[in-house]
Amino acid sequence: MGFPYYAHNSVKLCGFLFLLMLAAVFPAAAQEIDGELVLRSYLHTFPEKAAMVDNSGGDWFIKLGNDVYYWAGGRLLPPSLLGEKDSWAPHDFSAYPAEIPTPAEYSREDIERIRRESSAEARLAQDNRHYGFFMALYGAATEREAEGLLKGIRFLGRQIRVNNAIAASLERIDSNINRLAAADSALKNFLDSIGSAQCYAWREIRLKRQMSYHSWGMALDILPKVQGSRAIYWLWEQNRNDAWMMIPAEQRWQPHQAFIRAFENEGFVWGGKWELYDNMHFEFRPELHEMNRLLAAQNSPAPGARAAVGQDLHHLAPVW
């Protein structure tokens, strides 16, 4: 029996909020990412929002309109809050992995870490994080503001509301997927198996200000008509299977690879590549793809490659 979206919406979103805050540890991104690289990734992929990245007294900052946010040990804070940075928990920034994790390769330590980090105790212990930067970036600090940014589009034959900034990207994805499906019966069968597509849903954990990308209309959940016995979301599996993290990828519900690539080509990431897997979930995170590019340039021995870290990249930029 499948899982209707709204029957599990509150459970799924609460779990996703923790997933977002924890930012799932990516085996493919073990290298620590510094503040300059993170901020330049946002500058390159959100050029209509981010005006500049610079360094002041050893502290990197990014300017969004008239607002300035400083990198403070993983936090993104306005100048007025730098003196109390320890009262805010850092965000976790990781590059987007190229492949789905392979549970068979997890060590005993990996399994225990994943189990510990996904426990109810860990979820309840999550500290407050400051979301001013993200609210400024996506243009909404309240539900009313978020709803003012929405646009209705046809996607996968359904009417959905999305942030206007990603509407054109989703329309291109829809066009490309349907074009490919005309010549690929497996992809067409996958499209026919989709039960729902949902995007905007304002959610904020009371007193925590832990935001979901769904709250800004920047994420989608794609669910099948029938889930059967396949795992799709780590939190649902955790409730019934203590070894949920060891379920191999082939036993999880997965979108067709061409479907995933169509999203990735437009700057989205797929939750199936996270250790805390969320195979229904896609969210617009072009800065994570850009982090991959900048890390590759940073680590490349080729002459001049390091200079690429400071170069603008506009091909994944949203239209605001």
Image (cartoon, rainbow, N blue to C red):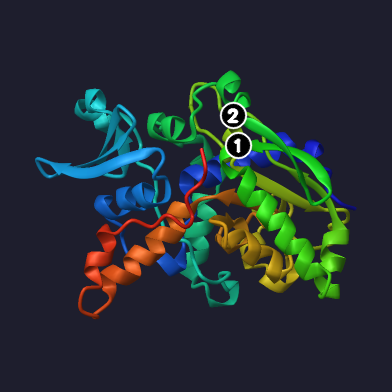
Viewer-proximal residue, 76 or 310?
A: 310
> Which residue sits at x=54%, y=21%?
142
The three-letter amino acid code for the residue at tag 2 is Leu
Whether tag 2 and tag 1 are in contact, CB under 8 A, the answer is yes
Q: Residue 195 appears at what percent x and percent y?
A: 85, 50
Q: Where residue 2 sits in the image (x, y, percent)?
A: 86, 51
From this view, report whether residue 136 is shown above or below residue 261: above
Q: Nearer the viewer, residue 77 or 187?
A: 187
Which residue is outermost to the bottom? 302
Q: Residue furthest left?
A: 57
What is the three-letter code of the residue carrying label 1? Asn
Q: Is residue 187 visible?
A: yes
Determine whether 192 is above or below 128 in the image: below
According to the picture, the residue beneath numbered tag 2 turns out to be 149
Q: Residue under label 1, please give it.
A: 164
Question: Which secondary structure lies at badge 1?
Answer: helix
Query: Secondary structure beneath disc 2?
Result: loop
Specify whether 238 is left or right of 57. right
In the image, residue 152 sits, relative to residue 80, either above or below, namely: below
Tell me: 154 left or right of 207.
right
